[in-house]
Image (cartoon, rainbow, N blue to C red):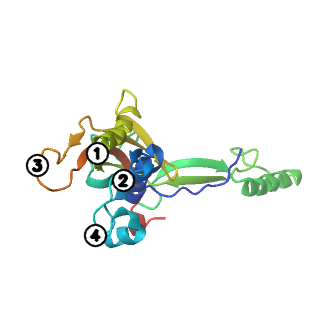
Amino acid sequence: MDNKAKTTPASTIETIDTGMYEWVNDYLNLHTTTNKGFVKAKVLWLGTERVFQLKNDQRLRDSIGKLILPLITINRTSMTKDPGFKGSFQAHYPEQSEEDSTLKKKVINQEKTSNFQNAHHYGKSKGNRTSKTDPTGAQVYNSYSSPIPVYVTMMYDVTLRAEYQQQINDLVQPFITTTGQINSFIFNKDGHRYEAFIEQQFGQNDTIASLGEQDRVFETKITIKVLGYLVGEGLNRKRP
């Protein structure tokens, strides 16, 4: 059994955001057919600055600055601390001191325990009296703990944009069928697991009904509700 301590990054707002982005970009890995063949749809996180978007990937926009379709955008729209929507940690257990936390793991410290055991047997061989409550010598444990997780409801809008109906159909269908007959799924990031729920209605905001001269754009918005949890205060945490 491996008793070595393994470091797991704390669950932060950025951890949940990144996990949601990677679920859409890497797990779903959406492709569709364009005039350049069967290509992957670009996934854009709307929280970044426009200047960074242009410098980070110039293929997102054409020569006049218009977004190149098909395109998928992800945006976190709200966060709610709802006591009625939480995970397995039900009780309110605030950290009032540096020692208040949840016990994660407890293992024997072999070196320290061995020292006490040797001292016990050495003293016994000399005829010294031993403690009646600890006839075999003391055992020393290493305890590993973590702060209490605080649950938060995070809402995300995933917007699919394309120039053709068939392209939008290709991009929407995996959101419907990947989870099977239910609307929930699990995504992971940095050793943490988060449960997400796809809202039932897929809103459409197309421009095909307009007879104007603007470009035809097919747009579908998918809302995803995530039950996330945060650990500690991040960079502002005063406790160890």
- Spatial CA distance of label 1 from label 2 is 53 Å
Query: Residue 12: horizontal and vertical position, in percent?
Result: 41, 58
- Spatial CA distance of label 2 from label 4 is 54 Å
- Which numbered dot is residue 50? none
Q: For label 2, count other residues whose C-alpha is less than 10 Å away and answer few (under 14), some (14-19) or many (20+).
A: few
Q: Earlier in the sequence, mark 1 or mark 4?
A: 4
Query: Residue 16: horizontal and vertical position, in percent?
Result: 40, 53
Q: Earlier in the sequence, mark 3 or mark 4?
A: 4
Front residue of 240/13: it is 13
Q: For label 1, count other residues whose C-alpha is less than 10 Å away and answer few (under 14), some (14-19) or many (20+).
A: some
Which residue is the site of mark 2?
A: 94
Q: Which kind of residue does numbered mark 2 sit on?
A: Pro
Which residue is the site of mark 1?
A: 164
Q: Earlier in the sequence, mark 3 or mark 1?
A: 1
- Which numbered dot is residue 211? 3
**Label 4 SS:** loop
Mark 1 and mark 4 in contact? Answer it, CB < 8 Å. Answer: no
